[in-house]
Amino acid sequence: MDNVNRGFSSWLRSPGHKAWLAQEGNRLLAFAKASRLPQGFGNLDEQGRLPADAIAETMNTARMTHSFAMAHINGIPGCAELVDHGVAALAGPLRDAEHGGWFAKPLEHSADTGKAAYLHAFVALAASSAVVAQRPGAKALLEQAIQVISQRFWSEEEGAMRESFARDWSQEEAYRGANSNMHSTEAFLALADVTGDARWLDRALRIVERVIHEHAAANNHQVIEHFTLQWQPVPEYNADKPDDGFRPYGTTPGHAFEWARLVLHLEAARQKAKLETPSWLVEDARLLFENACRFGWDVDGAPGIVYTLDWENRPVVRHRLHWTHAEAAAASAALLQRTGEQQYETWYRTFWEFNETLFIDLEQGSWRHELNPQNQPSADIWPGKPDLYHAYQATLLPVLPLAQSLATALEHLQ
C-alpha cells in the first residue's frame, strides 16, 4: 500500500473502502457458518441451507478451516470453534489413517479413494492458518500434511507436484496440472511463514519457473493447464468437457489472475527473506494480468470475465464465475501495491463495481457463484454457494502486505 502513487486517490487507502471490505467479509462469514456438518463442512445451497443429503468434503472443510482461522486471527468472535471443528475433521474422518493422506470425502461416503495434490495443498493451507491461530491439534495436522506432501507429492526432479495416486499411493495418474501446482504454490508460501523453512519458497519458485516462466510465457502469458508426465502440453485435454469445474479445456483467465497475485507474493516473500529473487517475476505478473483482461474481460458483448478461452483466445465457456472476479480484484490490488500504477486502481474499481452489482447477493446472502453469458444467475458449473474462500480472501488481500501469507500477515497486524 505504501507503493501506491500519491498522485491519485486509491481505494486501498480509503477508510471507507476498508470498512466496506471488512463488512462484506463478515457478511460472508456469517453465511458460511451454516455449512457445518458432523464430519466437516458441506456445500450450501442458494439460500444458505445444507441439503438433506449433504456430505462433508475435504476441499470445503479445508477452505472453511483456513477462512475461519483467518477470521479468528482478525478478531472476529464465533470462529474459533469452527476452526477446531475443521481441524478435528481433517485429523479424523477425512484422513486416511491406514495409508496416510486425505480422501475427498469420508471413506464411507465415497467410492473414489484416490489422493489428489489439489486437496492436500488445501489441507496444508488450512493447517498452517490454524497454527497461526494457535488452535489445538493444528501443529500435528500441519506436520502430517508436510510429511505427505514431501514424501508423496513433491517431485524434486521436476520441481513441481505430482498430481494424484490411488489410496495406497500406487497407480500415479499420468497427468501434470497447473491448477494443483498453483494451489501448492499458495500453500508453500504459507508453510514458509509458519515453519520458517525457506525451502518452501525455493519450491514455490521452481513451480512458478516451470508453469509460468517457461510454459505460460511461451504461450503469450496464457496459462497452459494440462500436461503429460513429461510436462508436454495437452492442448485438447477435456475438449469434450470444456466446462469442467477443475480441469476445463483451453485457458482460464481466472487462473491467470490468481497466478499473477501469487507470483507477486512469492517475489515479496523471497525479498523479505533475503533470497535471490528473479527480476522477471513482476513482469510475468504484469503480463498474466494484462492478457487475462485483454482476452477475458468484456469480450463477448457483455461485461464480465469469461470462464475459458480456446487457443485462439476466443471464448469457449462464457459463464462468469464468482471466483474468477474475486481473484481479478485481488490481483489488481496486488499489482497496485507493487507498482503504484493508476491502471491497476482503475481495474480494481472496475472489478469491485461488477462484483457488487452482479455477484454480491444481499437478499439471500453470500455471492452468486455463477452467471450465464447474459449475466443472469445460473448453476450449470457451480450450483449453490459452497465457496467462502475466494470471496473472503478478496476482502482481506487489499489491506494486507504482499510479503506474507494471509494468516501470518493478519497476525502481524494485531
Image (spheres, grey):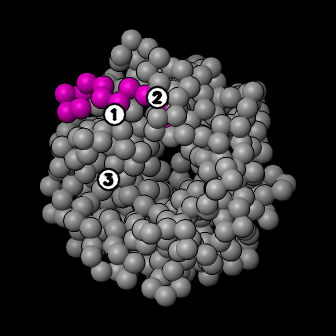
Instruction: Determine which residue is flagged by label 3.
Output: 178
Estimate the spatial distance between the alpha carbons at disc 3 and disc 2, rounded to whole Å: 21 Å
Q: Can you tell which quarter of the image residue 155 is in?
A: bottom left
What kind of residue is marked 1?
Thr
**Front residue of this view, candidates 141 and 107:** 107
Q: As drawn, which residue projects farthest toward the top?
A: 301
Q: Are marks 1 and 2 in contact (CB under 8 Å)?
A: no
Q: Inspect the image, locate mark 2, and give the three-letter code of the amino acid beneath it.
A: Arg
CA neighbours of label 3 inside 10 A, class few (<14), some (14 to 19), many (20+)? many
- Which quadrant is home to the C terminus? bottom right
- Tell me where residue 286 appears, x and y as whole percent: 36, 35
Please say if 308 is above or below 227. above
Mark 1 = which residue? 308
- Residue furthest out toward the right: 77
Q: CA distance from mark 3 to mark 1?
A: 15 Å
Q: Earlier in the sequence, mark 3 or mark 2?
A: 3
Say which residue appears at 81% left-offset and 52% top-offset.
76
Main SS class of the magenta portion in the image = loop
| Image: magenta residue range | 310-325
Identify the residue at the far front of this view. Answer: 52
- The answer, for residue 331, to whether it is visible in the render is no
Image quadrant holding the N terminus, namely: top right
